[in-house]
Amino acid sequence: MAYALQQLINGLTLGAMYGLIAIGYTMVYGIIGMINFAHGDIFMVSAFIAVTCFTLLAAADVSSIPLALMFVLVVSMFFTSAYGWAVERVAYRPLRGSTRLAPLISAIGMSIFLQNTVQLTQGARVKPIPPVIEGGIELWQTPDFTVQIGWSQLLIIVTTVVLMVAFTWMITHTAFGRQQRSCEQDRTMAALLGVNVDRTISLTFMLGAALAAVAGVMVTVYYGVVDFFIGFLAGIKAFTAAVLGGIGSLPGAMLGGLLIGLIESFWAAYLWAEYKDVATFGILCLVLMLRPSGLLGRPEVEKV
Amino acid sequence: MTTLLSVRNLTMRFGGLTAIDDLSLEVPAGRITGIIGPNGAGKTTLFNCLTGFYKPTRGSLRLAHPQRGEMHLERLASHKVVRDAQIVRTFQNIRLFPKMTVLENLIIAQHNRLQRASKFSLAGLLGLPVYRAAEAAAIERAATWLTRLGLDSLADHAAGDLPYGIQRRIEIARALCVEPVLLCLDEPAAGLNPRESAELNELLLHLCRERGIAILLIEHDMSVVMNVSDHIGVINYGRKIAEGTPEQVQNDPQVIKAYLGEDDEDGEAAP
Amino acid sequence: MSAVVFAHHAMTPAERLRDAGWIAFVALVLGIPLIGLTTVDAGGRLEVATRFGLLAVFVAVAFAGRLVLRYGLDHARARRLRRVQAGTEADDGRALAQRVVTVLGWFALGAAVALPLVFSGNRYVVDTATTVLIYVMLGWGLNVVVGLAGLLDLGYVAFYAVGAYSYALLSTQYGWGFWQALPVSGALAASFGILLGYPILRLRGDYLAIVTLGFGEIIRIILVNWTEFSNGPNGISSIPRPSFFGLEFSRRPAAGEQSFAAFFGLDYSPMQRLIFLYYVILVLALATHVFVSRLRRLPVGRAWEALREDEIACRAMGMNTTNIKLSAFAIGAMLGGFAGVFFAARQGFISPESFVFTESAIVLAIVVLGGMGSQMGVVLAATLLVLIPEFGRNFAEYRMLLFGAAMVLIMVWKPGGLLSHREPTLRLGAAAKATEGGR
């Protein structure tokens, strides 16, 4: 029981991070109808930026953890959204209205490119950083097991919830949110009504990247290690989360992320840890076969 | 006059929207049946139900196939509607295989026949005479239609590079290569100039009178619909509001109301 | 988005500078975190190192590159505009290019046949050429799926793995020979293709891509973890090599067997085996080429291409699109399986490390760069991609970076690939047919 509770906490933490990345997939899908395969690598870039920042701060002897976190978050979000912008500008915008296959291949190319850029410029070795936040609250002590929620876990969950609320507010209440939703529904019409479609799409990519950057910082804080390959698996899992929740749906992405996180941590704890990635892929296939519109998505009507 | 297709109480809903509402219609064999109605009346949705792209929410679509007997179209997948029931359609926004040549487009329309002749591609791979004969016959059939529609000189051009009016004709030629029992044309005159429309009229009449192909025609161009149709059904808001010969329909007060509007509402009259 | 294209007005020098300046600024922002700063290991903990000199060079290159590129693009556009106005679109230029490619193809074939005879003493050349041919074969296999049928398969390496492991297991566990195992392994790979394809081929293209990606990973994870079956990360070693009609390529053949060298009265040389392997893959690759080219001219092949062009129109023509996709998937998988069998037989040792996503990406890059659907393009791209790392360690490091960038650039500038001319599968008229017979 205590062990299960601990898995629940771990799963929620993991799920919060997947959810943050999944939002990037879902928003981009919503607006341009394609999967941004490079999104996982954008997340990876942000984790590297976080590592650099933390190392810089450690060298500068900054001891205030909240201050350090704020700084790293802001810096990482800024640079990562620049990457999100550049990826859209270079690899996707010229291909709007092209064949079905072209943007997908371009996205794969971008993903390979980013991965190798980081490998070449930052090194192929795993980057460890000293723990940023240690300790936690002991929730429940049984004779043989102690349930603990780490401060970092709490931070991740709380940050995610706050961001989700802010984000939902932005989409539903601001001018940008309105433009974003109008472009999702009908890009041509939105353009005719004076919405700057290019800018809206760019902003969407930047926002998605910024959220991935939050996840990247959190992963760095939580695991303390980063390498150039983390974007691949994280990307697939977050994508699975987005599909499970219903691609195009923001709450769906969050819900899907949490479910994937929970499934993964329970699977690893009770079944075969080495096959936990297989479980995610299995879910992805099952969802796509049985319910392609996901849990909260609207079924797509094929346009003939 | 025998009935080829009978649509009974057809209803198609998308979520809250009812695109077709309890529609019943008879399509006679060997005649041209026109379907008219304002934009968004549900005409194309009717085609999509008929050709298996949508599963109707309710109602039945029965085809009295001259050779194969009665068929329930609503139970068939889209490719089977074409393969087994021999109902072929064209699209409002032309759907050719743009990078392939005109001839290839027409050969692809004969895919099922050729695929059978190629015996899972084995006969084809080995170049057996069975397959060669089938391929020659397919090319022959394609060539016949190309000549009939005046496209033979364009046979080896990529279909997507040709002008719009020609692409419309290619699409019809391609549909004819399937040897349809019922040909469903979705706005075949859209974007054609008057001369091309006149040629279309002549072609439709030829197909129907000489070849005995029944035609179901969605069209906004009244010069086409009124001149060639034997029978016209008028749809508005997914319901059939009138039916009859072109003269009857033209004078029907309901139709006039639907097209011209009673007051300032619903001004989307077709040209 | 807009349907109207306005003539591009020439930029003033100031505008050009401003434009390039903006690009340089973007390069600076992007460059700071990855190029300007890096972390290095300093005795167990990380330290930040700066490379501002490199960053400055990067920004300067971006600035100058943009200026030159912009200038070149404007001029190219102006030239094209003039050509279009003059009405001399180079159609015969394309036909000429096609003829050149055909001649090149025969030339390449001749070179491929002659290569081991010319370089019979050079182990390195024959080995590299064999690798090129493996990739050519993989490229031709994937070309069926991606280039012809337009289905993006990101887990192609899975079928390669199925082929390789089934031969490895059949030969080491059950003593099967190469030529016996080849068809069986191919069939096995094809069955995997059908098994995977059946549930997912209804999906939209991008879902298909990610599911195949997942499938490739699943196969690899299983190979790593299911030790009893695949011997895990240690892989399978001492896989027997193919024999030449029962003649082995070894100095001392097993009891009761005869060696190739002894049978033909030659002195034993390890090169004999390498050259033999080279010819085996050459034959396999050529057989693949003939097979695929013939299929393309059959109803299935045309259906694949039609599917790539417009799936809905295919259904409206009465095609069972699921079956057509499955056939493309299965045939692609089978060809990948064959290549896998050869790979296992040539290496004599396989482990899950040979079947990572990067391999799928390389094969995809070969297909994309070569021009989807173009057989000669695949040869060109495979040669290029295998040879680049051979030029030196630096090139090897930058190889995947270049592939990735090239994939993006090709899609943006020339989505058809390097050789994008499409030859119709049939032509109307006897005259056209007669010329076609020679091909």
Image (tube, coloured by chain):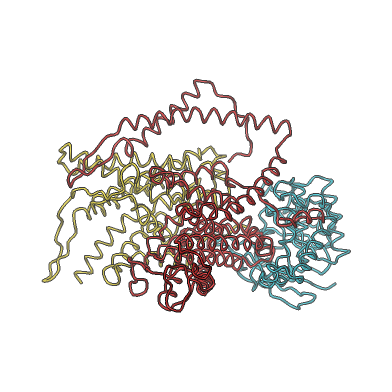
Q: Nearer the viewer, residue A85 or C412?
A: C412
**Rendered view: A60 above or below C314:** above
Q: Which chain is yellow?
A: A
**Rendered view: B59 above or below A240:** below
Residue at far left of view: A143
Q: Residue C385 appears at what percent x and percent y?
A: 48, 49
> Left or right of C208: which side holds C350?
left
Determine the colour of chain B: cyan
Q: Residue A14 appears at what percent x and percent y?
A: 29, 58
> Left or right of A163: which side holds B223?
right
Q: Quadrant of the N terminus of chain A?
A: bottom left
Q: Residue A118 appears at what percent x and percent y?
A: 35, 44
Residue B60 lies in quadrant: bottom right
Number of marks: 0
Q: Quadrant of the C terminus of chain A?
A: bottom right
Can residue A31 be seen here? The reply is no
Q: Which chain is red?
A: C
Q: Residue C390 appears at what percent x and percent y?
A: 43, 47
> Left or right of A303: which side holds A229?
left
**Rendered view: B53 above or below A156:** below
Q: Nearer the viewer, residue B45 or C82?
A: C82
Residue A243 lies in quadrant: bottom left
Residue at far right of view: B210
Q: Nearer the viewer, residue B92 or B17?
A: B92
